[in-house]
Amino acid sequence: MKNDNLVKIKINKYILLDMLNNRLDCWFKNEENSEKKKSLFLDMYKKSIDDGVFESVEFNVLNIVDNDVINWCRVLEKDSISDEWERLENLYKSGERDVSYEDFDTNFKINFIESMNDNMILVRY
């Protein structure tokens, strides 16, 4: 897409979050624990909006959500990572989101802890 075809707009952050939520519905509507999983992504997006991550960038809801769900993020359930859960929880609660310097017993590299609830954690790898 050529930049001269783009327009600059301002949008209310709640409308922006709603747009992201609508796309998440496409991914999680038929999945077990879909609302809990969606809430983790929404929490991550709310933090991103508040931190200004989407300011002055080309914003494409499909690219953002689809890439996060398919390529960059993973929801881990407490039962599946019971050996690492407490460590991740402690890091998250102490404000450590960037954990790229840590080694975890998982089959992929965890770089960031994006969000967490009682029995699930959203990580970026």
Image (tube, rainbow, N blue to C red):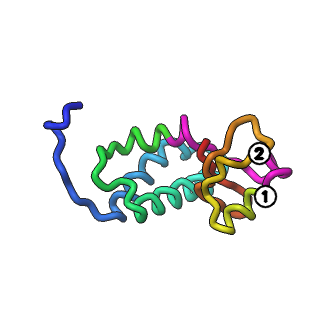
Dot 1 falls on a residue whose secondary structure is helix
Q: Which mark is residue 104?
A: 2
Give the vertical position of 31 relative to 38 (above or below). above
Find residue 41 and report its horizontal and vertical position in percent.
54, 53
- Nearest to N terminus: mark 2 or mark 1: 1
Q: Amino acid at mark 1?
A: Arg
**Label drawn at residue 87:** 1
Q: At 29% from the left edge and 44% from the top edge, which residue is drawn?
A: 58
Spatial separation of the CA atoms under disc 2 and disc 1: 9 Å
Above-or-below relation of 21 to 118: above
Q: Which residues are magenta?
A: 68-86
Secondary element under disc 2, as helix, strand or loop, is loop
Disc 2 residue crowd, few under 14, some 14–19, many 20+, Cα 10 Å: some
Q: Is residue 14 left or right of residue 103?
A: left
Residue 108 against residue 75 in the figure, above or below:
above
The residue lying at 47 percent from left, 39 percent from top is 66
**Dot 1, crowdedness within 10 Å: few (<14), some or many (≥20)?**
few
